[in-house]
Image (cartoon, rainbow, N blue to C red):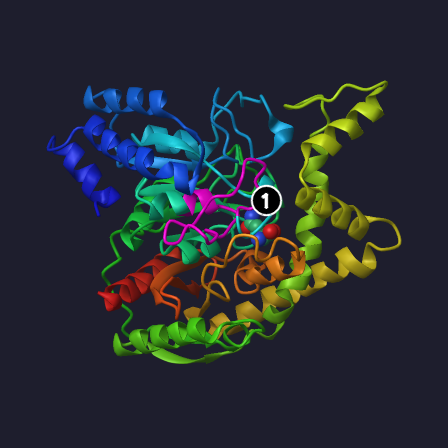
């Protein structure tokens, strides 16, 4: 495996050309994309032109010549951005997302737009209007979701780096199921300008990579203040890559009881978390049991707050401003016909749940109550971080499940997010790092959580786990 860092170094040194690197990756895509379906669009021509520009010396930067895959809910100027929904059919964004612009400025070569659950609602990528993505480790299994295409693209070797978005686990859970690294940054660390909004108080963009160092490298390029996003933090970014080898001597690690023992956590996954705790202790960390009592209520609060925000955000798809229009007698009927034809069943379910939770008479009992629970979660995490630097728990309750296994029962699908949702509600960062395999031989990811802006600590802790496996 060639890492992004190695590619960038080799291209910079003139040992390899960006075009050569790109053709190698396109060849892997040609070989396996028909089975995996990681992409909604492979950007061959644009990528070739970008690579030629790198080789001509016209494009330089930390990622010059490195192939990168973009989740298809990130706006790319002039290039279809579908959110894997029919309702955006034919729409081409008039601008680039800030993360896309930053990657372009760093010399990255975009290979394509990756498949997702429609509008990032789901945990398996089966909710895509364009058909599911398959797990490169076993084509009968899901890659996780909603950023399943990005996770699969990295796992299959289509690109060493990819971007995803994470509202309730959509970077970390597919990373775990596909055996790659995935990080959800602190709320506000990465600009969301040009990310199609799902639930604005929760959405964050973050990196996928095959190694911890590559995830750190990608995050360094995309993070930082952006005046175009009013939730963007205006703070200097702590260096991420340089401290990766610093180890965990003396670090206080808490094994997060409520999530390690949550309903549905498979014994083989729990054993990998225990093995990770041991590996960290062996490396000098002080490992103890930690409790975040309100984390148990995260899932219930999330499935009110996220649909409520989604129902509001998705009101803009009205048949006038974007993509699809189904004509009818008058405007109201056109709106309804367009939305009926354009949205898939899960998106409709979320809109109905959200509008219900926000409606007069129910607002206090549902949305208001969920917000109170969210405050408790924030407080309980803050209390835990008085005693611990990092918390450890599973990323996903199980290894990758079979396609079709959970599509008939939305609740069983939602239960996948039990361990990832709490850090979205708290606004804190979290990383999933591969840590061995389950009984079925499929990858298991373990999750590290930390307080706001602790990305450097999470990454160096993850680096210790990565090293312990080798
Ligand atoms: N699986 C969760 C959901 O369906 C999280 C999705 C996400 O993080 N975008 O809402």
Residue 7 in the image, given as x and y percentages of width and height: 20, 39
Q: Nearer the viewer, residue 40 or 82?
A: 40
Q: Nearer the viewer, residue 142 or 183?
A: 142
Query: Considering depth in this image, is 89 or 60 the residue closer to the camera?
Result: 89
Q: Secondary structure at mark 1?
A: loop
Question: Does 386 sit left or right of 6 as displayed?
Answer: right
Residue 390 is left or right of residue 463, and the answer is right
Q: Residue furthest bottom?
A: 288
Q: Residue at x 24, y 53 (%)?
A: 242
Q: Is residue 434 magenta?
A: no
Q: Main secondary structure of the magenta part?
A: loop
Q: Position of residue 35 (x, y in %)?
A: 40, 41
Work out whether 335 lies above or below 465. Answer: above
From which residue to which does the magenta span run? 125-151
What residue is disc 1 on? Answer: 127
Residue at point 40%, 62% (across, down): 445
* Residue closest to the far right: 361
Q: Is residue 153 visible?
A: yes
Q: Is residue 33 left or right of residue 381?
A: left
Rendered-image quadrant of the C terminus = bottom left
On screen, residue 365 above or below 239:
below
Q: Position of residue 126 (x, y in %)?
A: 55, 46
Residue 363 to residue 51: above or below: below
Q: How many labels, in total?
A: 1
Q: Which residue does the image show at 55% across and 35% down from the upper left?
A: 130
């Amino acid at each position: 495996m060639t890492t992004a860092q190695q590619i960038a170094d080799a291209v910079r040194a003139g040992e390899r050309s960006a075009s050569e690197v790109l053709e190698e990756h396109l060849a892997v895509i040609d070989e396996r994309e028909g089975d995996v379906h990681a992409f909604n669009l492979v950007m061959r021509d644009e990528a070739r032109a970008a690579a030629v520009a790198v080789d001509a010396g016209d494009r330089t930067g930390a990622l010059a010549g490195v192939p990168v895959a973009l989740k298809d809910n990130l706006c790319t100027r002039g290039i279809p951005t579908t959110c894997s929904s029919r309702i955006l059919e034919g729409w081409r964004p008039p601008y680039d997302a800030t993360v896309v612009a930053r990657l372009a400025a760093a010399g990255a070569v975009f290979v394509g737009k990756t498949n997702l659950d429609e509008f990032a609602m789901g945990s398996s990528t089966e909710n895509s209007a364009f058909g599911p993505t398959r797990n490169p480790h076993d084509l009968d299994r899901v890659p996780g979701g909603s950023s399943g295409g990005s996770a699969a693209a990295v796992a299959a070797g289509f690109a060493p780096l990819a971007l995803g978005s994470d509202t309730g686990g959509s970077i970390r859970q597919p990373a775990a199921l596909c055996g790659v690294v995935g990080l959800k940054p602190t709320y506000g660390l990465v600009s969301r300008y040009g990310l199609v909004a799902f639930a604005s108080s929760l959405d964050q963009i973050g990196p996928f990579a095959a190694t911890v160092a590559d995830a750190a490298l990608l995050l360094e390029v995309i993070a930082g203040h952006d005046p175009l996003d009013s939730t963007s933090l205006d703070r200097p970014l702590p260096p991420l890559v340089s401290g990766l080898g610093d180890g965990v001597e003396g670090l206080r690690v808490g094994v997060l009881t409520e999530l390690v023992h949550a309903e549905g956590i498979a014994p083989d996954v729990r054993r990998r978390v225990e093995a990770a705790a041991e590996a960290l202790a062996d490396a000098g960390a002080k490992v103890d049991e930690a409790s975040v009592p309100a984390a148990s209520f995260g899932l219930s609060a999330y499935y009110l707050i996220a649909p409520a925000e989604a129902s509001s955000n998705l009101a803009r798809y009205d048949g006038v401003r974007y993509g699809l229009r189904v004509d009818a007698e008058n405007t109201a009927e056109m709106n309804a016909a367009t939305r009926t034809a354009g949205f898939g069943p899960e998106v409709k379910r979320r809109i109905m749940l959200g509008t219900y939770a926000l409606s007069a008479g129910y607002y206090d009992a549902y949305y208001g109550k969920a917000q109170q629970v969210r405050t408790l979660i924030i407080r309980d995490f803050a209390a835990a971080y008085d005693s611990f630097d990092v918390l450890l728990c599973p990323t996903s309750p199980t290894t990758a499940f079979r396609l079709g296994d959970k599509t008939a029962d939305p609740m069983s699908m939602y239960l996948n997010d039990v361990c990832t949702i709490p850090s979205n509600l708290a606004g804190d960062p979290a990383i999933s790092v591969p840590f061995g395999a389950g009984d079925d031989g499929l990858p298991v990811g373990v999750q590290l959580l930390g307080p706001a802006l602790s990305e450097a600590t999470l990454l160096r802790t993850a680096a210790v786990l990565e090293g312990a496996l080798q």
